[in-house]
């Protein structure tokens, strides 16, 4: 027997996942103390396998709750604990870009590996490491991808679209999407000068009169999408749409992306957002069956 545990703010995704699995769903009861600490209550007598659903967008508070919930679940009987984190945070800091920088990906991975037996996620930002096994050493790491789903969605709505990766790192997702959907693709070159300062150089591949769809793993400040959109429109693209796995869209990102000239945005339901257009629930359910 298996149980899906989730938090109230992800109850919708959790209900869809539990229903796809045919598992019981229970929500963690969270009490917030006035000083910012939280008290968690879990169901009593947990089954052998418990999967904890926690997307790590806006991660810091959630991480503390996650580690506490995992430890509590073990005490209440869970023998195999799986973390289902459709968005796994801290994956982009995968090296010390400047002396003294903490390599968050490595250390967060070890922290999670100490609490969970397996971790299922979608399109983690793996650039300089080959796979999830390197992120969560000694544990089972499963990295799914929404790229093919997004590519097929794009092909249905914009037949003949040119898929554009805004940087070399996004090339991996664009290649998968293009192959799954039979679409053309190309990769830009990006230089980041600050959190919101991004320059994107378009590839030699002609975009003039093409319906361009910019594809990336994550939209955070949206500045990467804005720079790529402006570049494509300046070179005569007929339209620019966007497809991303993780629709974080922090601060004014959504408004900025519209202002840059993006026509439509499609995302997966890894992160709840108005742009959600494809669902990763069936692939999460299949992966969970494989680890339980
Ligand atoms: C970085 O390499 C990622 O793939 C995204 O391009 C990046 O995180 C997007 O960030 P932002 O929306 O803040 O430009």
Image (cartoon, rainbow, N blue to C red):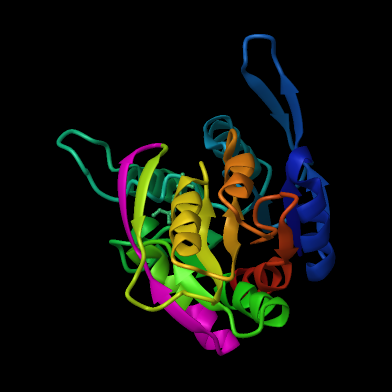
Which region shows up in magenta? 176-195
Was residue 184 drawn as part of the magenta stretch in this picture? yes
Q: Please give the name of the residue rendered at 50% of the width and 50% of the height, measured from the top-left corner.
A: 226
Count of marks, rendered view: 0
Q: Please give the name of the residue rendered at 40% of the width and 49% of the height, measured from the top-left corner.
A: 109
Q: Is residue 85 visible?
A: no
> Percent from the top left, x then y, of residue 112?
46, 47
Q: Nearer the viewer, residue 42 or 260?
A: 260
- Work out which residue is located at the far top of the displayed protein and give it: 34
What quarter of the picture does the N terminus occupy?
bottom right
> Percent from the top left, x then y, of residue 283?
66, 73
Q: Quadrant of residue 161?
A: bottom right
User: Along the horizontal axis of the image, is 139 left or right of 46?
Assistant: left
> Percent from the top left, x then y, of residue 211?
58, 74
Q: Please give the name of the residue rendered at 39% of the width and 37% of the height, measured from the top-left corner.
A: 195
Looking at the image, residue 67 lies above or below residue 258? above
Q: Nearer the viewer, residue 100 or 261?
A: 261
């Amino acid at each position: 027997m298996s149980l899906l545990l989730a938090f109230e703010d992800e109850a919708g995704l959790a209900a869809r996942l539990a229903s796809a699995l045919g598992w019981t769903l229970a929500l963690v009861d969270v009490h917030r103390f006035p000083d910012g600490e939280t008290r968690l209550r879990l169901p009593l007598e947990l089954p052998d396998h418990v999967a904890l659903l926690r997307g790590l967008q806006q991660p810091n508070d959630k991480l503390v709750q996650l580690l506490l919930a995992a430890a509590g679940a073990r005490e209440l009987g869970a023998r195999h604990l799986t973390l289902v984190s459709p968005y796994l945070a801290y994956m982009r800091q995968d090296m010390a870009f400047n002396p003294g920088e903490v390599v968050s990906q490595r250390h967060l991975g070890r922290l999670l590996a100490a609490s969970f037996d397996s971790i299922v996620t979608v399109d983690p930002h793996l650039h300089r490491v080959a796979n999830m096994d390197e992120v969560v050493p000694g544990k089972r790491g499963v990295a799914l991808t929404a790229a093919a789903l997004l590519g097929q969605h794009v092909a249905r709505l914009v037949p003949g679209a040119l898929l554009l990766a805004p940087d070399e790192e996004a090339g991996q997702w664009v290649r998968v999407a293009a192959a799954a959907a039979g679409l053309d693709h190309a990769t830009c070159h990006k230089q980041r000068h600050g959190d919101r300062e991004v320059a994107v150089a378009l590839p030699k591949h002609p975009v003039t009169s093409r319906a361009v769809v910019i594809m990336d793993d994550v939209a955070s400040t949206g500045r990467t999408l804005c720079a790529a959109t402006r570049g494509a429109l300046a070179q005569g693209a007929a339209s620019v749409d966007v497809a991303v796995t993780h629709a974080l869209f922090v601060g004014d990102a959504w408004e900025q992306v519209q202002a840059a000239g993006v026509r439509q945005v499609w995302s997966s339901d890894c992160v709840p957002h108005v742009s959600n257009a494809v669902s990763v629930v069936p692939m999460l359910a299949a992966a969970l069956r494989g680890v339980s």
